[in-house]
Amino acid sequence: MGVCTGFSQCALVVINAIFADFYGALQKLIENSGSHSSLSNFNIGDYLESATLAFILLGVFFFLLGIVGCIGACCKVKCFLVLYAVVIGIIIVGEIVFVVLLFTIRDTLEDTLRSPLYESLENSYEGLNSSTAISLGWNFFKCCGVENYTDFEKATKWQQHRNYSIGNVTYELKVPIACCKLNGSFPDVKGCYNALMDFLLDNSDIMIGVGAAVAAVEVLMFIFAICVCHAANRKNIDEVEPW
């Protein structure tokens, strides 16, 4: 039992130290994001602007969770260990529920995903040279609208029917250039929703592997916390028992 407890303590300290460092990494990413750009019209600071608060909250959560885990493991503080185990347990249950819902109400989830895509296209899409997140999304997947190119007729911020020059030839763009193809059908009828689904399916093995690894680490942390908590509880019982 002593070896198991010692190993559990060390594992909890190491893993939760990583959690605590995760906060610093997120803060550094946010600080540096506004001063670098890898593309002429791409500013990652603008891209992450709407998600900055979420990143900060996520970093604070992991930082506090890491501190609680480290203190609980190093000092065998029972209340910290119990709190840590409960939080990890809630996360594990939440992930299980999410996976179950993903397979049981898939049609509902698909409709839920489509709605914000339509809203983003109608209210946020500005064209190929825009650095907004939604514009970069359309351009990254090289797709056309949510379902097809006719969706752009409702885009309020995109300048429709404008001229585009290639060499000495000028064309009138009635659809975004992302919808134009040199070969195959024109305009491109593949919507971005299907492109997004294809991207997720193509990378499903990687995502499943990463998800399984994260879940395994979480289960181990939960077990380690229970082991250290049990050892601390046994020690308290032994100390109060008369000789």
Image: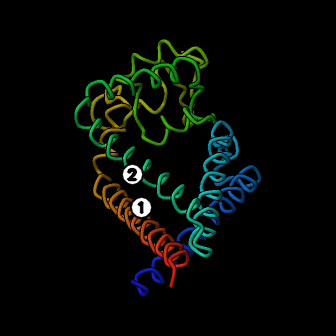
From the viewer's side, name the closer residue of 179 and 147: 147
- Image side of residue 198 versus residue 137, left or right: left
Residue with the mark numbered 2: 92
Residue with the mark numbered 1: 218
State the SS at label 1: helix
- Image side of residue 200 versus residue 120, left or right: left
Residue 184 horizontal/vertical position (percent): 27, 35
From the viewer's side, name the closer residue of 223 and 58: 223
Residue 79, quarter of the rendered image: bottom right
Instruction: State the residue at coordinates (64%, 66%).
Output: 21
From the viewer's side, name the closer residue of 24 and 125: 24
Image quadrant in which the N terminus is located:
bottom left
Instruction: State the residue at coordinates (42%, 61%).
Output: 218
Q: Are marks 1 and 2 in contact (CB under 8 Å)?
A: yes
Residue 187 horizontal/vertical position (percent): 35, 25
Number of disc labels: 2
Q: Neighbour class for label 2 at 10 Å: few (<14), some, many (≥20)?
A: some
- Image side of residue 236 versus residue 47, left or right: left
Instruction: State the residue at coordinates (23%, 37%).
Output: 103
Residue 239 horizontal/vertical position (percent): 55, 78
Residue type (three-letter) at the residue carrying disc 2: Ile
Q: Neighbour class for label 1 at 10 Å: few (<14), some, many (≥20)?
A: some
- Image side of residue 236 versus residue 184, left or right: right
Residue 157 horizontal/vertical position (percent): 61, 18
